[in-house]
Amino acid sequence: MPPAPLPIEILPDWARLNGVEFLNVELHHIDGKGFGLVATQRLSLSADHEGAIDDAPLAKVPRDLALSGAAVDEYAKVDHNFRQLLDAMGHQSSRVRILLYLLAHLASSKQDRAGGQGAVPTPWTEYAKFLPREILVPTLWSESERDLLQGTSLEAAVNAKISSLHSELDELRTKSSELPFWNALFWEQDTVTLEDWALVDAWYRSRCLDLPTVGESMVPIIDMANHSSEPDAYYDEDTEGDVEILLRPGFTVASGNEVTISYGEFKSAAEMLFTYGFIDRNASTDEMKLWLDSLPDDPLTQAKLHIFEQFPTVRLSRTEGTVRWDCPYVHLMVLNEEDGLEFRVLQDTDGGRQLKVFWQGEDATDQAANFETLIQDHPLCPLFRLRAVIVLAGQLTARLGRIRNTPTSEQPEGAQLREACIQAAGALKDIEVSLLEATLAALKEQETHLLADDAVKAYLGPTEDPQNEQDSTEATNEEDDFS
Ligand SMILES: C[S@@+](CC[C@H](N)C(=O)[O-])C[C@H]1O[C@@H](n2cnc3c(N)ncnc32)[C@H](O)[C@@H]1O
């Protein structure tokens, strides 16, 4: 278990000691959000001489406190044990380097209590002790709580993320247990667990900022600003590289009110829950992304997926009441050899073998994600589109059924579900059910429209139902799969 956080009341002392300036805000507990920044006086950009301020920062943090990949590399120059750990891990992304740094400091703070040797201390050693241990990102939910997400777009994403956290930790264990210092600190007394690795990952994801010059960084105190879809503040670097919170032009915040920033205007409910552990009901972005299952009997599935090169997903979105679906893969997925789709393995000049896809005899390998356009000029294009619409509708209907059949709040025996998780999963389901229903209605309309198309009618025959096209022996000469 990670140690309990330090009381937030002593954080201003840490801040003073480390050169952080709280100019017009202070830290407060905010209901349902943990801690946040609150105005200590009326703030306004318009100078009205009533305690107003100009565009001076509300808080300012020295650039040396920003934790970026480059800052971790600098730290490794003073902590030779940490240098060894980075070297053993090989070339890693900024994210992994920052996670290793946080983990080293988290493990050291446990070790402190046991009196052993830890990482060379920095201001972050103490600051990490103030960070929340309970973050409502689903990677930190219990298994029973994660079951609440069944059917939603987060089900697969969270499972994949948890497997990847497992693999990362396994890799860390293998590589660091050969280093005596880290073996003693991390593993000999089980100081580090998957829960710790998931926690530092959650800190990183939920608190990381994108700074103009330094890039992805965690900045103490600035990371105490909460999100709003109508933010009154923003963060930036000043000319010295120090990081500031600034009031947005034209905004006013009453004394005692919270100062908020935006975590990103265009994030879906699922993305907000995944990254930050809450859903902003006022967000304008109404969209979701789902994995498309392959057709069970399609012998070309492996070849299609290989040539497509991307994940086969469908993105649903709604803007001002109009729904839209984007699914480049489905247009390739519903084509068969009889339609003019062909896969060939060709030998290249250096003896290697390459899979290529041909459409109507033309090499279409570079356009595998563009079959929606490639089929446009084919006389049976409406039929291909109809197949795509039917396949998609089938998958979305199954998805809707799964969401509806998942219990939303029942407490499974022996498991205690946290109310916040029940609420968050319920909110996500409401949002996704509504979008799925609206998309299915739109697909139904498209289906009706396509069924009335002359080319489709001629192809299917007078009484044929496209769902049964595969069974038909009279009206069709093809073996299309609409399952
Ligand atoms: C960058 S931190 C902000 C400081 C955080 N409240 C704390 O106590 O450390 C981001 C986290 O704050 C919380 N948070 C931020 N904005 C929120 C909001 N509008 N509603 C609910 N929780 C919010 C979430 O837990 C999120 O993961």
Image (cartoon, rainbow, N blue to C red):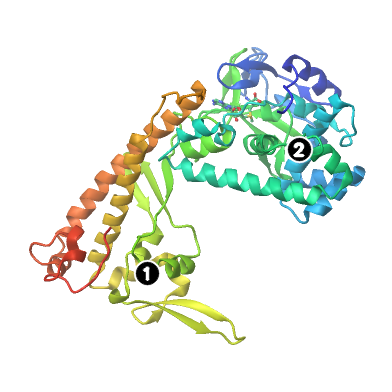
**Image: 405 above or below 226:** below
> Between 400 and 60, which is closer to the camera in this rendering?
400
Does label 2 point to a residue whose CB lies under 8 Å from ligand 1? no
Which quarter is ligand 1 in?
top right
Q: As rendered, which of 432 and 321 lies closer to the eye?
A: 432
Query: Which quadrant would residue 401 be assigned to in this image?
Result: top left
Q: How many numbered dots are placed on residues in this image?
A: 2
Residue 284: x and y, percent? 43, 35
The quadrant of the rendering that contains the C terminus is bottom left
Q: Amino acid at mark 2?
A: Leu
Residue beneath the point at 23% across and 53% down: 446
Residue 143 horizontal side relative to residue 244, left or right: left
In the drawing, does residue 291 fall left or right of residue 16?
A: left
Q: Position of residue 217 (x, y in %)?
A: 71, 40
Q: Is residue 49 above or below residue 103?
A: above
Q: Quadrant of residue 297?
A: bottom left
Image point (86%, 44%), residue name = 82
The amino acid on which the numbered mark 1 sits, given as a three-letter code, is Pro
Q: Residue at (62%, 21%) from the top-left corner? A: 34
Q: Which mark is residue 219?
A: none
Q: Is residue 415 above or below residue 200?
A: above
Residue annotated with mark 1: 299
Q: Quadrant of the N terminus?
A: top right
Viewer can see residue 179:
yes
On the rendered structure, is 101 left or right of 443?
right
Image spot of residue 42 (x, y percent): 63, 14
Q: Report the residue marked by disc 2.
A: 103
Query: Position of 47 compared to 483: left or right?
Result: right
Q: Residues within 10 Å of mark 2 (few under 14, many from 20)?
A: many
